[in-house]
Amino acid sequence: MKAITTIATVTTDGKITLQLPPDIPAGEHQIVVVIDEKPLVEKPQTKDKPTPLKFSAYPVGLVSETVTFRRED
């Protein structure tokens, strides 16, 4: 017996799709579905792209003046 915990999206016609781990053999299986009575908090649907992260530059310099890590060396 395996327990798989995941989040499923239920469509308006009451269907869900599951992706099982590859070690589950093909064929008929008995499964148990437990559904919370209230759905998870939904994120608002927006078509805007998320704000990109901004990272500041941090100069670290060379490890050593004699080591450059070039292919030619």
Image (cartoon, rainbow, N blue to C red):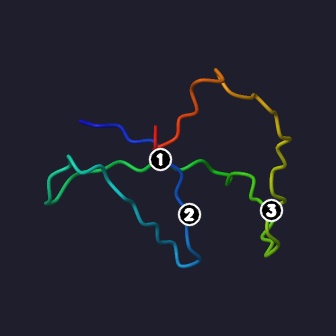
Give the image location of residue 63, x and y in percent: 64, 22
Q: Which mark is residue 34?
A: 1
How far apart are labels 3 and 2 at the CA level? 22 Å
Which residue position holds label 3? Answer: 50
Residue 52 locus on image (x, y percent) = 81, 57
Quote the CA–CA distance across marks 1 and 3.
33 Å
Residue type (three-letter) at the residue carrying disc 3: Pro
- Residue at x 46%, y 66% (from the top left corner): 16
Q: Secondary structure at mark 2?
A: loop
Query: Looking at the image, which residue is at 77% across and 59% down?
Result: 43
Q: Secondary structure at mark 3?
A: loop
Q: Residue at x 74, y 58 (%)?
A: 42
| Number of the label disc, if any, that sits on residue 49 | none
56 to the left or right of 64: right
Q: Amino acid at mark 1?
A: Val
Task: Please tell me whether residue 34 is drawn above or below residue 13 in the rendered image.
Answer: above
